[in-house]
Amino acid sequence: MATKLYVYTGTGNSLWIARQLALELKDATVGFIPNLSGDLKVEADRVGIIFPVHIWGLPSRVIQFINHLQVKPETYFFALAVNAGQPAATLLQLKKLMLTRGHSLAAGYSIVLPSNYTPWGGPGPVETQERLFREAQEKVKAIAETILRQERKKVDRGPLWQNILFSWIYKMSFRSVRKMDKKFWVDDKCNRCGICSKACPACNIEMINEKPSWLRRCEQCFACLQWCPQEAIQYGEKTVKYPRYHHPEVTLKDILDQAKANKE
Ligand SMILES: Cc1cc2nc3c(=O)[nH]c(=O)nc-3n(C[C@H](O)[C@H](O)[C@H](O)COP(=O)(O)O)c2cc1C
Ligand code: SF4
Ligand code: SF4
């Protein structure tokens, strides 16, 4: 059996989870979720998508991917929604979206890892981060077993009040996500290296007069802010005082590879 894992990531949490899962499944290959404009045919027997929860719902790239994906009718489809403790109704949203495209989501799991949404504070103390990594690893092992047995089950979800309230906020904000990059700015530490521009999976940063400029097609993955080696990128006023984060086992090269894969 062949399993194909598709991943989208800003700070490596989802990529790390995909790699952990691939180790458990043994037959799996990991690729990045491309920025699709045309259909993509996938022949694998099992297909998994692994992505971060953004504003209590699916990132636009995941929606686009599902809209263009073609799989065999018997494909076993599963998803892992990586989040900071509030997946809300993201996996229900995915299940419904897939149904509209004629696919069936067999299982959907929430995985909690450190937060990369810096405006709401940093990723938490190192001990808490390490605990989350350990717990996630255990959960991935259990998930791998259910995948190998091709079990069908209810998708993970948050409490009802969060699913209702936060799904509404998601819907209200979804259209403005592209323009949320207007809150990014660069402080004096910027040495004009251009890494932010190369790391952006949405090609949303152009170096103009040797300074990064955001182009209003942002996906809010936060890769630019988190991977800037000088920590020179800020978002609004609060990020100045918070530490940066990326998964310790994921490198800048991984993130540049994701961005490159989108340009191919
Ligand atoms: C714009 C944005 C919105 C986010 N919204 C949520 C959210 O609604 N619920 C949640 O639990 N985590 C949220 N997060 C946190 C990420 O889902 C979490 O840190 C995830 O592990 C990041 O994965 P990645 O490193 O693969 O990008 C958000 C992060 C960003 C950047
Ligand atoms: S990665 Fe940071 S230092 Fe390099 S150009 Fe971008 S903002 Fe400036
Ligand atoms: S501009 Fe920054 S936050 Fe927006 S998609 Fe690019 S890397 Fe992600």
Image (spheres, grey):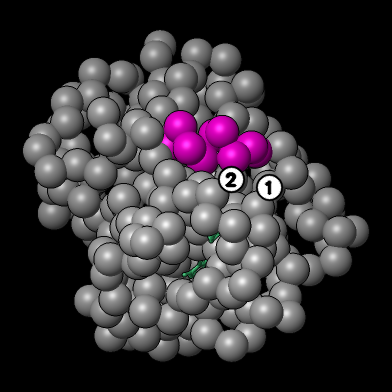
Name the residue located 13 percent from the left edge and 54 percent from the top edge.
100
Please report contact status of discs 1 and 2: CB closer than 8 Å, yes or no: yes
Does 62 sit above or below residue 173?
Answer: above
The residue where tag 1 is placed is 247
Residue 226 position, x and y percent, is 60, 59
Q: Nearer the viewer, residue 217 or 80?
A: 217
Mark 1, ligand 1, within 8 Å: the answer is yes
Left or right position of 128 against 65: right
Please, which residue is most extreme toward the front here?
A: 209
Label 2, on which residue? 12
Look at the numbered disc 2 and say if its residue's Cβ is closer than 8 Å to ligand 1: yes
Q: Position of residue 2 (x, y in %)?
A: 39, 14
**Residue 58 visible (yes or no):** no
In the image: residue 144, left or right of residue 161: right
Q: Position of residue 72 (x, y in %)?
A: 18, 24
Check disc 2 and give the amino acid type. Answer: Gly
Numbered mark located on residue 231 in the image: none
Choose between 130 and 256: the one closer to the eye: 256
Magenta-drawn segment: 250-258
What residue is shown at x 71% (from left), y 37% (from top)?
A: 249
Please state which amino acid type lies under the numbered disc 1.
His
User: On the rendered image, what quadrant is the N terminus found in?
Assistant: top left
